[in-house]
Amino acid sequence: MSDASALGAYRALPRAVPYAERWVFAAIVLVALAERAIIETAPDVSWLLTLGERLLAGERPYIDFIEVNPPASIFLYLPALVLARVSGLSPEFMVGLLVFAGTGASLGFSARVLVKGGVIESRSAWPLASAFAVVLLVLPAATFAQREHIALISFLPFIACAALRAQNKPVAWSAAIVAGLGAALTAIIKPHFIFPVLFVAATAAFYARSWRPLFALENWISATLALLYGAAVIMFYPEFIHDWVPIITAVYVAQKASLIDLFTLGAIPFWLGGLLVIVAMKRRAAFAPPFVLLLAASTGFFASFFAQQKGLPYHSYPMLALIFANAIVAAFDRAPQARQSPAMFIGALIAIAGLHFATFSWYAVTVDTRAIAAPIRAAVVRPKILNISGGGLVGMGFPLTRQLEGTWVGRTCGQWISAGVLAAKMRGVDAETKAKLDRYMALDLKILVEDIRNGKPDIILADRNHYDWYKWAQRDAALAHELENYRPLAEVESVLILRRK
């Protein structure tokens, strides 16, 4: 990504191969398409598509159904749902199509900004796009189309404009508007993603040795839209702010991975490994513009990941995707000098490939619901479904419900409230906090009883894996009374499947 470098590894391609760089890019896209045919839709995406359908049907968020995230998470998938209705294609297909199209548009726009600004040479655009296509379309695996994935795609134009700002190069107002809209969407998708916006803007200002990049048009646009979104949530969704944020904060946000787990398992070790490879290949140049803007963005997403402190694989996707894209570009830049130290260069390539494979394997882990689906499909056609589960939030009910062409009749995706209450009590709480948590669990039980009574689900899934949620349900008199209308259908992989009598 420097003026002196045109990604030497691709320069070596014979000119006798017409459009070789484009064929490489096309091959990466084909691999990504094949991957999408194999890997199921992420549970979170499936759940949010269901909420979007209920929203379009006239139901009210945080009243008729409950989501732990602000409303942007629900609205994010509405375009795919609308296009699915118009085209007759499935919402899942339309989500994939829009993500692929958005990736192409983001990469094309960012490359154009960098080439017109003189940051990279035009013949470097396709190799650079190929490097990013690997981490944007292949690396995500089961995290594909998650909010983190979409947030990173929308953020790339902002990084491209910041690369120009860092070198005091002019940015076209049209490019600044697109970058500002993309950064705003990134921050709106998750408030935690304000960190990469701030880190990239601050890094551009530091290297430009000027305050001007901090007050660039794209920054004003992103800040204004993010503030307007916040105000809209307060104004139009008061139930989320007043009724649910206190509960979410107490029982969901409060559940965090330990620092030991965060620093020893998965994301952070992968990220540090990628950073070491980059520094080994680029040395001081790794911290010079425009290359450093990728590091700044990745570090910002690292801060977002750490702030959430959940340790979930998909939370780490943006920080790892950027650090690995950075490592690939560093390898391209280093290729012309590979003869001087071939052992180090080969070692770096092996390290990059190993980190990519390890991270891909981490992201590729999915919940296989086929065994659970089989007895349900044999017993009921298009069932109404609900679950009693506290672990993994939406992992048991989705995408299973949509695969069965069923209807989810619960207001929540599971007993995340009660799970949080039980976890908090295990850590130890004072009497006042215990009383508050008991009220939250009572609310959770009330919602569950009403959903079973009013929704009359054909199938109830009870998780008995790490905690027996069926026994938990039996301890409440009202809930146990509703469950008398159900009989066991099967038990598969510690999931008790109940069918309505």
Image: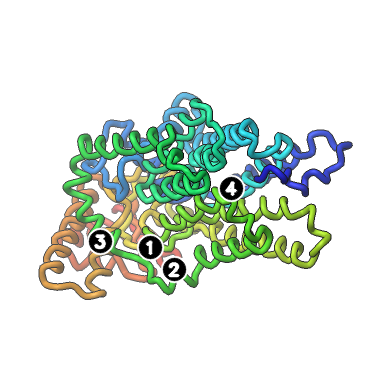
- Where 70 falls versus 445 (above or below)? above
> At 54% across and 35% down in the image, what residue appears?
102
Which is closer to the viewer, label 4 or label 2? 4
Q: Position of residue 447 (x, y in %)?
A: 20, 52
For the residue labelled by badge 1, is the local secondary structure a helix, a strand or a loop? loop
- Disc 2 crowd rating (10 Å Cα; few below 14, some 14-19, many 20+) is some
- What type is the residue that disc 2 sits on? Leu
Q: Is residue 446 left or right of residue 327?
A: left
Can you identify the residue that label 4 sits on?
289
What is the quadrant of the N terminus in the image?
top right
Can you identify the residue that label 3 sits on?
251
Alpha carbons under labels 1 and 4: distance apart: 30 Å
Mark with earlier residue (2, 1): 2
For the residue labelled by badge 2, is the local secondary structure a helix, a strand or a loop? helix
- What type is the residue that disc 3 sits on? Val
- What type is the residue that disc 1 sits on? Gln
Alpha carbons under labels 4 and 2: distance apart: 30 Å
Mark with earlier residue (4, 2): 2
What mark, if any, has residue 309 been given in the picture?
1
Which is closer to the viewer, label 3 or label 1? 1
Tell me the colour scheme of the image: rainbow
What mark, if any, has residue 262 been given in the picture?
2
Mark with earlier residue (1, 4): 4
For the residue labelled by badge 3, is the local secondary structure a helix, a strand or a loop? helix
Q: Position of residue 336 (x, y in %)?
A: 79, 52
In the depicted view, which residue is nearer to us: 115 or 323?
Answer: 115
Residue 482 location, quadrant: bottom left
Which is closer to the viewer, label 4 or label 3? 4
Q: Is residue 477 left or right of residue 9?
A: left
